[in-house]
Image: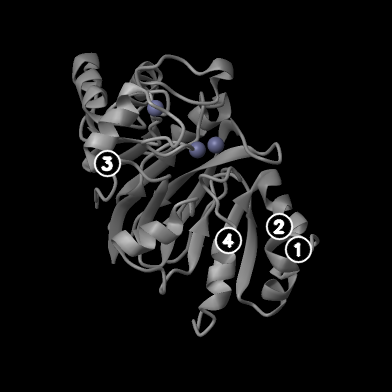
């Protein structure tokens, strides 16, 4: 059964950020409903996109991961990929199913580093793979896979992970016929990704809005609200979005408060219905 729940909506630092006293962090300290855990999206009981730094807390708040079988990895930054959760899966080894991780491009190579390093997770990863507790898969950009009864197509992003890989954005063909696109951490989309998206009509468009109202990211590896508006106009023009598509903004950094995000979105007049996500919000 589809859930479509954001278990976390912050960028890498969390909101409030531990070492920050900016107005947005102070606002979040005064108003716990404005606090954000690190990014994670639950498609259904069996599938997650991003399994990040706050996963154990998210399991306490929004429900356990006992039925989780599939993790789509966008990239290897720690806010999106918490490798300690593999240890947790081992501790819960009365599970009858393995935990599958899906990587694209060079991101998959990190699994070799995990398997061949005695310092990482007590040197156990190779054994968990051998025993079938953990299974690693390599996906190719722009190819279609069937995972968990859902069509999955990874698209190349423009954001470098820990081992220099480009990020993956995921298009999901949901069992009810809708198409969901998960675009974070995207940066400015590569031309090929924009081109390949012309073949799809997206109903639910999830985008990073990392820089909020704080302006453009040096190097272009993250998007601000102006960038997301420009991107959604481009996707609307090329037919990937339509007037009934909905845009959901997540991966929001601490520099813009939740209320200022909403205010800015209203003022910018996005071309499709746009929601500023908060932790726990459900879409499907
Ligand atoms: Zn991130
Ligand atoms: Zn701050
Ligand atoms: Zn990142």
From the viewer's side, name the closer residue of 37 and 152.
Answer: 37
Query: Nearer the viewer's eye, disc 2 or disc 3?
Result: 3
Horizontal side, residue 66 vs residue 136: left or right? left
Which residue is the site of mark 2? 111
Which residue is the site of mark 4? 84
Q: Residue at x 29, y 41 (%)?
A: 203
Sequence-first disc among 4 and 2: 4
- Colour convention: one colour
Residue 139: image location, x then y, percent: 62, 53
The answer to whether 247 is drawn above or below residue 280 in the figure is above
The answer to whether 149 is drawn above or below residue 92 in the figure is above
Disc 4 crowd rating (10 Å Cα; few below 14, some 14-19, many 20+) is some
Q: Residue at x 50, y 35 (%)?
A: 185
Disc 2 crowd rating (10 Å Cα; few below 14, some 14-19, many 20+) is some
Q: Are marks 2 and 3 in contact (CB under 8 Å)?
A: no
The quadrant where residue 18 appears: top left
Q: Quadrant of ligand 2?
A: top left
Disc 3 crowd rating (10 Å Cα; few below 14, some 14-19, many 20+) is many
Tell me the SS state at disc 1: helix
Tell me the SS state at disc 4: helix
Q: Which mark is residue 278?
A: 3
Q: Can the viewer see residue 186? A: yes
Residue 94: image location, x then y, percent: 51, 85
Q: Are marks 2 and 1 in contact (CB under 8 Å)?
A: yes
The quadrant where residue 175 appears: bottom left
Which residue is the site of mark 1? 115
């Amino acid at each position: 059964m589809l859930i479509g729940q954001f278990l976390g909506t912050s960028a890498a630092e969390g909101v409030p950020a531990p070492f920050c006293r900016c107005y947005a962090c102070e606002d979040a300290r005064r108003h716990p409903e404005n606090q954000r855990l690190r990014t994670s999206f639950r498609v259904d009981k069996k599938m997650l996109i991003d399994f990040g730094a706050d996963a154990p807390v998210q399991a306490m708040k929004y429900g356990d991961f006992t039925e989780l079988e599939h993790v789509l990895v966008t990239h290897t930054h720690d806010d999106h990929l918490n490798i300690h959760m593999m240890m947790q899966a081992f501790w819960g080894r009365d599970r009858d199913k393995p935990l599958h991780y899906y990587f694209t491009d060079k991101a998959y190579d990190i699994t070799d580093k995990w398997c061949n390093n005695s310092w990482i997770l007590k040197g156990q990863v190779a054994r968990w793979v051998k025993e079938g507790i953990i299974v690693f898969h390599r996906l190719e950009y722009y190819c279609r896979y069937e995972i968990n009864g859902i069509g999955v197509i990874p698209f190349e992003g423009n954001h470098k992970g820990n081992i220099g890989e480009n990020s993956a954005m995921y298009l999901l063909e949901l069992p009810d016929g809708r198409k969901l696109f998960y675009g974070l951490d995207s940066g400015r989309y590569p031309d090929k990704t924009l081109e390949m998206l012309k073949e799809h009509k997206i109903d639910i468009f999830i985008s990073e809005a990392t820089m909020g109202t704080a302006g453009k990211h040096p190097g272009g590896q993250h998007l601000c609200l102006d960038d997301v508006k420009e991107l959604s106009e481009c996707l609307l023009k090329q037919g990937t979005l339509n007037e009934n598509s909905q845009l959901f903004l997540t991966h929001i950094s601490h520099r813009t408060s939740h209320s200022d995000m909403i205010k800015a979105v209203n003022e910018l007049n996005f071309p499709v219905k746009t929601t500023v996500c908060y932790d726990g919000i459900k879409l499907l």
